[in-house]
Amino acid sequence: MKTRYHQIIVPLLFFICFLCVNIGQARTKQLLMPFVKNFSKLEYNGANQNWDVCQGVNGVMYFANSDGLLEYDGASWKLYPLPAEQIVRSVAVDSAGRVYVGAHEEFGYWEKNKNGQLEYFSLIKFVEDHQIKNQDIWKICIWDNKVYFQSFAEIFVYDGEKLTIINTPANVFSLFKIRDRLLVSIQNMGLYEFKQDSLVALKGTDQLSPKTINIAIPYGEKGILLGSELGGLYKYENEKMTPWKNDADDFLKNFQLNKAATVSINDKEYYLFGTITQGLVVLDKNGGIYSHITKSQGLQNNTILGIKVDQYNNLWLSLDNGIDFINLNSSFRYYHDRSGELGTVYSAAIFNGKLYLGTNHGLYSAVWNAKLLQLETDFTLIKDTQGQVWNLKVVDDVLFCGHNNGTFLISEKGIGRISNVSGGWILKEVPGNPDLLIQGTYIGLVVYKKSGGQWRMFHMVKSYHEPTEFLEFDYKGNLWTSHAYRGLYKLKLNSDFSSVLKSEFYNKENGLPDDSNVNVFKVDQQVVFTTKEKLFSYDYNQEKLAPFKKLNTGLKDFKDAYKIISIDSRNYWFFKKGKCARVLMNHGEIKSIDALSFQLLRGSTLDGYENIIALGRGDYLICQDAGFSIFSSHQMDKSLSLQNHQVILREISCNSQTSKLHQALDLENPGEIANSKNNMNFEFSLPVYRFGKLKYQWKLEGYDVFWSDPSDRTLVNYSKLPHGDYKFTVRATDNYGSMSKIASYSFTILPPWYLSKLAKIIYWLLFFALIGGFRVVYYYKLDKQKRKYYLKLQEENEEKIIKLKNEHLREEIENKSKELANYTMLVTKKNDLLNQLKEQLEKLEIHVIAATAKKRLKDINKLIQSGISSEEDWKLFNENFDKANETFLQNLRKRYIDLTPNDLRFCALLRMNMTSKEIASLLNISPRSVEVKRYRLRKKLNLEHEKNLVEFLMEVNEQN
C-alpha cells in the first residue's frame, strides 16, 4: 500500500515541482510588460463574458458579448441586443462595415443605415429550422467575398444573396483564415481547406488525431503553427507536422491553449497564445517567452476567449470577465511592484550586470539582461540598506549609494559605509579634479577623495550647513547650490574644498520670482535655475540673475519646469507637475521637444523626485512610485500621432424646441432640415486607442467664427439655429498639439414657412399685384390730379379773366373817378364862375335904374342860378360816385341810418379828399359851414377825437 502510495505521490510531486519551475521561469522573463487597460462590465454596460472580438475598417471595435453586440469607438460603448436577446458567440466585419454576428440558432448582420445607426438583418430565413436547431455559431470568417458561419455541426455560406450549407465529414471545431486560405478543423480528423466550396484534407494534419486543432496562425513565410487545447504546438510546413519546441511548451499543454494570433513588435514577429486558466503568453519566433501576462500582472481574468491585434498593433483580449487592452507596440514596458515590497523608486543604476533600485525601503538588485532589457531574477534587498535611498551613481567602477543613514559604496568586493552624514541627495564630480567628489546632504556638503585606489570621505565643507539637494559647478569654478525654501547660493571654495571663501545669496530681492522652488541644473554647459515661472541664468558681465530668454522661448510650455535631468550634452528631460518632455539639443539650439510619448507617465512618478537613467542604445529607465518603466526611443508608438486619423461622425440628429425626440439625419448626403427642428446634435469620436484622453475641437461654419476650446465632449448641441447653410467641422487633438484630420458635415436649415419658396412665390405674386394696384391707384390719382389741375387751371383762367375784367372795370372806375373828379372840378369852377357872375350882376343891378335893364339882369341872374348844380346834378354825381367807389354811399347809408342825403353828399366829397374850400364852392356854402358839417358828421359817425374823418371814410368799404 505504501509502495503504491509512493508510486502515485512522488511522480505527482515531481510534476508539480517541474510545473512550478517552468511557471517561475516564465514569470522571471515577463516582469517587464506593456501597460494593461481594463474595461469592466460596469464600464461597457454588458455581461461578463466576451466571446469574440474584431475591428472595423474605420477603427471601431466590436465584441461578441453575452448580452449582445458591443461597439466601442474610443469614446463610448454601445450595446446592441439581438431581437431574441441570445448570447452573441462570434463577430466579424467586412470591408463595407457590415458587422456579422453568430448566436444560438441565429446569425445575421448589423448594417448602418443612412443615419449611421445599426440595424439588424437576420439570415435565418434562408435556413430550415432543423438545420440550425440547438446550434451556436462559434466562428465567422469572411473569405473570397463570402461569409462563413461555423457551428459545431454545420458551415453556412452566405454570398450576399443566398445561403448554402457545406457538408463536413464530422463535427466542425473551428475555422481559420490563414493568409489567402480558409481552413477548417474537423474533430479528430485534422485540417481541411476550402477549395471551390469543397473541403480538401490537408495532408499530414490528421496525425494530431485524436487531438482536435483549435488554433492555427501563420508561421514564417508559408508555414502554419497549429495547436490543440492540451497537445502543445506544431509547425506545419511542406505537408509535414513537427512539434515546435518552445519555452512555454509544457505550460501551454497544461493550461488549455484556446486562442492565438500574431503581432509585429518593432518589426519583429511574435506569437500570442491565450489560455483558459493562465492568461496570455507571448513568444518570439524562436520560441522564447517575451511576456506572460496574467491577472496578477493586470488582466481582469485569466480566461482568454478572444484575441485581436488592431490596426496599430494594439492587443484586445475578450475575457470570461471583461475586456482588456494592451499596447504591445508601445515604446514603454513596465515593472509593476503590485505587492508593494519595493516601495517608491527614487534612483536606479546598472552595475556589474545587475539593476540596482534605490527606494524608500532600501537598496534592491536583480540580474539584468542588458541586451533584452529584461530581468533574469527577482529583486532582493541588499543587506543593511533598509531605509530611504536617495541617489545611486556609478563612479570609477564603484557604485555610490546616497542613503538616509549615510553613504554606501558597492563594489565587486561587497558593500560598505564610507560616510555617516545623513541624506546623500546628490553626488557630483569636481571639474578638473578626478579624485574628488562633492555631495549634497541634509546638513551641508561632503567631499570624497580617492586615495590609493580607494574612495573615502575627505571632509565636510566648513561654513556651509544648508540642506543641499541640487548643486552645479559653473565654468569659473563657482559652486551653485539651492535651498528648497530660501533661494540660491554661489560659493567660492578653497583649493581643497574644505571651506567657503566667499558666499553670495540670491532670492526674490535679486530678481527671482519667488524664494522657494528654485533649483539649479546645467544645460549645454551653462548653469540654469528653474523657478515657478521661467528659467534663469547668471549674467557674469552684469553680475546678476536674468531670464534665460533663448531657452525659455524654445521650451514653450516647459519653461516653468522644476527639474532637468541631463543625459548628455544633447539629451535632456524636463519635468513639470504631471508632465514630462524629452528635449534634444545641438549646440544650444533646441531641435525637438517630445512630450506626447510620455503621457503614460502621468501620475506614476513622484513629483519633485523624478529620475531617469540612460541604458544605452536610446533606452531609458524611468523611476516610478510603484516600480519602473523602460522607454525605448527607437520603438515609437505609431498611434500616438493623430495626423493620419480622422474623426468619425457617429450620429447627427435634430429636434424641435418642444420635443426631446431626435430625428437622425443622413450622414452621407447634405441634410435639409425643417426650420421647426433647428436644434442640431452632433456625436463623434476618434477610434484611436491609447492611454491619455483625446480632446476635440469643433466649429460650425456659418455660425461660429473660431474653433472651440479643446474638450473631451463627444456630443455637441446647437440650439435655435437661424435658417441658412452650415458646415459642421470637428477634429481631435491632445495636450501636446497633435491634430487629426477634419471630419465635416454640411446641412441647410430651411427657412420658416413664411420664408419658404412657395411663400416667396406668393410674396412675389402679391408684390406684382401690389405693384399693379399701385399703378392703378397711381394712374387714378394721376388722372384725378390732372382733372384737378385742369379744373384749377380753368379756375385760374376764369380768375384771370375776372381779374382782367376787374382790372378793366377798375380802370373804367378809375377813369370814371377821374372823370367824376374832373367833372366835380368843372362843376366847382362853373359854380364859382356863375357865383362870381351872379355877384357881379347883383352889384350891377343896384346901379341899373331902368326897369327893363333890371328885369333883364334878373332874368340873367335866374339863368345863372339855374346853371349852379342842382339836385339832378347831385343825383347824377351820386350814381357815378357809387360806381366809382363800390357802392360807398349805400354801405354808409346802411351802417349809419341817421345820415341825411346832405350828409351822404358831404361824405362823398370828403372821400374824394376835397378841401373845405372846394366843398364849400361845390355846395355853395361857406368854408365855415363846411367845418360845422364836419363836426356834426363826426358826431353822427361816433368817431373818436383822434380818428381822422377822411381816413375813416376811405376805410368804409374795407370794413364791410
Image (tube, helix red, strand yellow):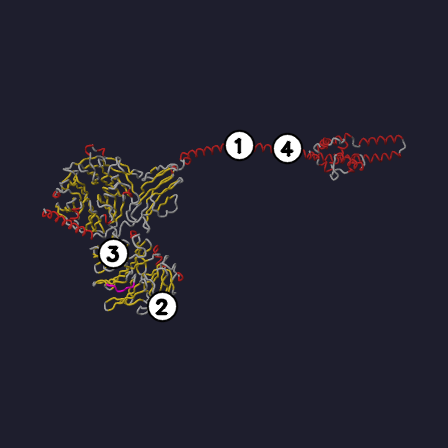
Question: Secondary structure beneath disc 4?
Answer: helix
Q: Mark 1 points at which residue?
A: 783
Question: Secondary structure beneath disc 3?
Answer: strand
Q: What stretch is highlighted in magenta?
A: 416-421
Marks 3 and 4, how far apart at CA: 123 Å
Task: Check disc 2: other Cα within 10 Å, few if <14, some if 14-19, many if 20+.
Answer: few
Q: Name the residue under label 2.
A: 502
Principal SS element in the magenta part? strand
Q: Do the residues labelled 1 and 4 touch (CB within 8 Å)?
A: no
Q: What amino acid type should be assigned to the residue bearing mark 2?
A: Lys
Q: Mark 3 points at which residue?
A: 619
Task: Check disc 4: other Cα within 10 Å, few if <14, some if 14-19, many if 20+.
Answer: some
Q: Which of 707 and 579 is in front in this view?
A: 579
Q: Earlier in the sequence, mark 3 or mark 4?
A: 3
Relative to 93, is 572 above or below?
below
Marks 3 and 1, how far apart at CA: 101 Å
Marks 2 and 4, how far apart at CA: 127 Å
Left or right of 879 in this view: 330: left
Q: What amino acid type should be assigned to the residue bearing mark 4?
A: Ile
Quadrant into which the C terminus falls? top right
Q: Nearer the viewer, residue 348 or 808?
A: 348
